[in-house]
Image (cartoon, rainbow, N blue to C red):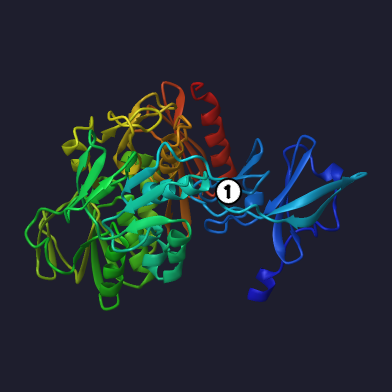
Amino acid sequence: MATEQSKPKGPDLVRGVPLDTLGDGAMVGGHVGEEAVLLARRGDEFFAIGATCSHYGGPLAEGLMVGDTVRCPWHHACFSLRTGEAIGAPAFNPMSCWRVEKHNDTVFVRDKIEPGGTRKAKRPSAKPERVVIVGGGAAGFAAAEMLRREGFAGDVTLISADDAAPYDRPNCSKDYLAGNAPEDWMPLRPAEFYKDQSIKLELRSEVAAIDAKAWQVTLANGQSMPFDKLLLATGAEPVRLDIPGADQPHVHVLRSLTDSRAIIAKAETARRAVVLGASFIGLEVAAALRTRKIEVHVVAPDRRPLERVLGPEFGEFIRAMHEEHGVTFHLEETATAIEGANVKLKGGTTLPADLVVVGIGVRPRVQLAERAGLKTDRGVAVNEYLETSAPGIFAAGDIARWPDAHSRQQLRIEHWVVAERQGQTAACNMLGQRQRFSDVPFFWSQHYDVPINYIGHAEKWDALDIEGSIDKRDCLVRYRHDGKVLAVASIFRDVDNLKQEAAMERVAPAA
């Protein structure tokens, strides 16, 4: 079966595709030898690039072509059809490209085009010469990678409090926690990448202070580090449980790879787990632990899981789906104490648990910005270029509160892809490119075999349109306010979700 699945699918593009089967805007997934290749047409131009997304292997032929780009149906990575470059996270690795020829009424894919290297030509680096990035998560890594991709030849220092080089944080609560993703899937780049790209990676390092006037940061060990441009990407930290017994060894939060490893180690001997909080993270943890055959109880004050984000219909579906997989819910409930291996609930119930995972939210790490005198407003305030109130200092990711072009509101969103794309935009702006951050927010959540894709942002809505059936796991749900679509959630309607994203981009105010 594995051999059968690994065989190239679709037409042999070397033999050609009839022109009349490839209309304007059409894409065909085929192969050249043993390699999966996507053939696309835009007007009188034809492109051929690798057909398997470099992020998680999504089928690009089942995605959406927008202009001369293609977007992955799974997690909305975006690639240039002209060059194969990964121009939108969560993918970073480029696609291979092939030469295309048209003869008479047939289009042929020919030889592979050798890449010109990952770095662009080096640019004069008089301004800036030294870039310091504080935070080794999604935004910090994406910024460092983009600086080098854009040809920046100055010093790049990435300071991270984590003990691991930048890794795939979403997987910490998904396949990795469930035991379905190997350890080597987790690093965003191999260790040699940082050496090859001359990125100085300072792990287990805390920044104690930023002096915006003297243009330097001071580390907790007393070391000072000068900068010409600075990116703050300090992320968020889990809200800790403030009840008796919350500091016991079997009580965990999940934010880092270290946290995920600790939960996995405990899960090897645990029989009963209690998850406190029905957040996306909490429910993904519940699903992962059920995959490991552990009894799971979820305690949350909500009437329905995720109702505040997705609405009551979606909330009921999510509850039923988890219950089908053996999860027991204790809703409109809170924990009052953890006494040994017992979790006491406000309503009087006692739940035995040799593993407790707390998922009651996160808060942005803004203390460093506040001490530096930067403007904060429920996050670090930035303009449309992601620059803070201090010139030359930028912020991205979970801490950044930016003017969103789609909702016309100031937003701060804790999404992995948003953080990555903000890091990429901030890097370009540190190089003087003046790019407005205008991406439509996107995140995905995985529950067993059900993926939920969500674009936009709707804190409240007055109308909810359901196309298809949530219960049948085939739906597109639009969240409207005053007639305007603010957000869209979907299950297995990936192309429709991408089309909604593209439509939101078109109606955004012009730059």
Query: Residue 137 at what x, y percent from top left?
Result: 35, 52
Label 1 is placed on what type of residue? Cys
Q: List the residue tagged with mark 1.
A: 72
Front position in the image: 359 or 214: 214
Res 294 quadrant in image? bottom left
| Nearest to the observer: residue 435 or residue 299 | 435
Farthest-out residue, right: 104
**What SS does tag 1 mark?**
loop
Whether residue 85 is visible here, answered yes or no, is: yes
Q: In this view, does 243 lie to the left or right of 306?
A: left
Residue 97 image point, x, y percent: 70, 52
Q: In which quarter of the image is residue 232?
A: top left
Is 298 left, or right, of 484 in this rendering? left
Question: Where is residue 80 drawn, in percent x and y?
Answer: 63, 44
Residue nearest the viewer, comparing 458 with 6 = 6
- Residue 364 visible in the shown view: no
Compared with residue 227, is residue 506 higher up or lower down, i.e. above or below? Answer: above
- Mark 1 crowdedness (10 Å alpha carbons): few <14, some 14-19, many ≥20: many
- Above or below, 337 relative to 150: below
What residue appears at the point 54 percent right and 45 percent down from the top-left corner? Answer: 122
Considering every residue shown, the one lying at the far bottom of the view is 269
Q: In which quadrant of the rendered image does the N terminus lie? A: bottom right
Q: In the visual, does 64 lie left or right of 230?
A: right
Count of numbered circles in the view: 1
Is 376 in front, or is 311? Answer: 376
Residue 314 percent across, percent down from the top left = 40, 44
